Amino acid sequence: MQQFGVEVNRGPAGNQTYTIYSNRRYASPGEIFVEGDASSASYFLAAGAIGGGPVRVLGMGTDSIQGDKKFAVALKEMGAIIDASDNWTEASAPLDKLKGINLDCNHIPDAAMTLAILALFARAQQHLEISPVGASKKLTASPLWQPSYAKLALLLKKVRITSPSHRQRN
């Protein structure tokens, strides 16, 4: 609201009270930045990490308020070259292959599946873990899914992926 000229006063810390004075009018800031979807951005950043790159995603950078912006941190841990600014993130392939990582993906549940695919390009075993709580973020939003999800939660424990160069031969 402040970007549009309306002053908002927040109450004391821990209190969810806001004061907005009457007779205030919104004013156009002229130009406003609208952040892109960080989950969708993960596909393009992954492409940069495996395809050479650089691939730059505009509208999702270090100032993003979305949790899936941490996907870029996981890419960097895998060895990808990551560069970022307040409103863009760029990924390039490492000089060597990506390396496998062990990561609890509960903080990036929507981007976890993109990391699972990246494991196929890693030079070592990769272990990704996501709890039923993280995986169900969208499933449990609908009351229709809740009974089925209770059964699914018992089955879903861990996603473990082994990169092709480390698969056991039969």
Image: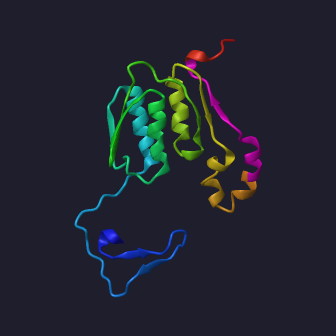
Q: Furthest residue to the front?
A: 12
Give the vertical position of 156 relative to 142 (above or below): above
Q: Residue at x 75, y 52 (%)?
A: 150
**63 relative to 120 in the view: left or right:** left
151 or 75: nearer the eye?
75
139 or 17: nearer the eye?
17
Residue 27 figure quarter: bottom left
Q: Quadrant of the C terminus?
A: top right
Tell me if residue 141 is in the magenta stretch: no
Residue 125 coordinates in the image, percent (x, y): 59, 22
Tell me if residue 154 is in the magenta stretch: yes
Q: Which segment is the magenta one?
A: 150-164
Q: Residue at x 56, y 19 (%)?
A: 164
Residue 142 figure quarter: bottom right
Q: Work out whether residue 70 can be spotted.
A: yes
Q: Work out whether residue 109 can be spotted.
A: no
Residue 41 figure quarter: top left
**148 relative to 92 in the view: left or right:** right
Q: Furthest residue to the bottom?
A: 23
Colouring of the image:
rainbow
Q: Residue at x 35, y 76 (%)?
A: 7
Residue 123 coordinates in the image, percent (x, y): 52, 19
